[in-house]
Amino acid sequence: SSECFGRKCGLVFGSERMLQTDLGSIAEASGLSLEETSSALRVLLGHVSEEVKKMAATSFETTGFSIMVNQAKSGNFITCELDLRILEHPILGRSCCVGVQSDIT
């Protein structure tokens, strides 16, 4: 949809957006301080970043996996498995990273 066009997925979905907009709500829901919450989300983001780097380093032949926090449409915070794949368009040859989230809360 239009809110996704031209933006990194982390700024639309998941931990990166939450660091910027929902940190207080997550801290309150988890019972952690703002500092602890920020640190935990940054660890999760670092892991996703490492998974993408690992996939790129192996010519996109591997897949990536991580655990992340996201927010459901209801507003509730959920824990998700993130399955990452880098796919190549069969005609244009352009690559894109696709992440599928599964709620494991």
Image (tube, rainbow, N blue to C red):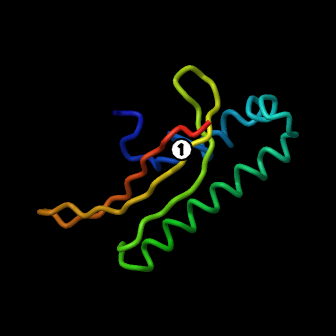
Q: Residue furthest left?
A: 91
Residue at the image point whose x is 59% and y is 38% from the top: 70
Residue 73 placement (x, y as % from top left): 52, 23
Residue at the image point whose x is 29% and y is 61% from the top: 87
28 displayed left or right of 14: right
Q: Quadrant of residue 43?
A: bottom right
Q: Quadrant of residue 55?
A: bottom left
Q: Residue furthest top?
A: 74
Looking at the image, is 52 positioned above or below residue 19?
Answer: below
| Mark 1 Cα-neighbour bin, 10 Å: few <14, some 14–19, many ≥20 | some
Looking at the image, is 29 positioned above or below residue 8?
Answer: above
Q: Residue furthest bottom?
A: 58
Q: Secondary structure at mark 1?
A: helix
The residue under label 1 is which amino acid type? Leu
- The image quadrant where one finds the N terminus is top left
Residue 14 placement (x, y as % from top left): 57, 42
Q: Residue furthest front?
A: 104
Residue at the image point whose x is 84% and y is 47% from the top: 36
- The image quadrant where one finds the C terminus is top right
Q: Number of numbered discs present?
A: 1
Q: Closest to the observer: 58 or 24?
A: 58
Circle 1 sits on which residue? 11
Residue at the image point whose x is 46% and y is 54% from the top: 83
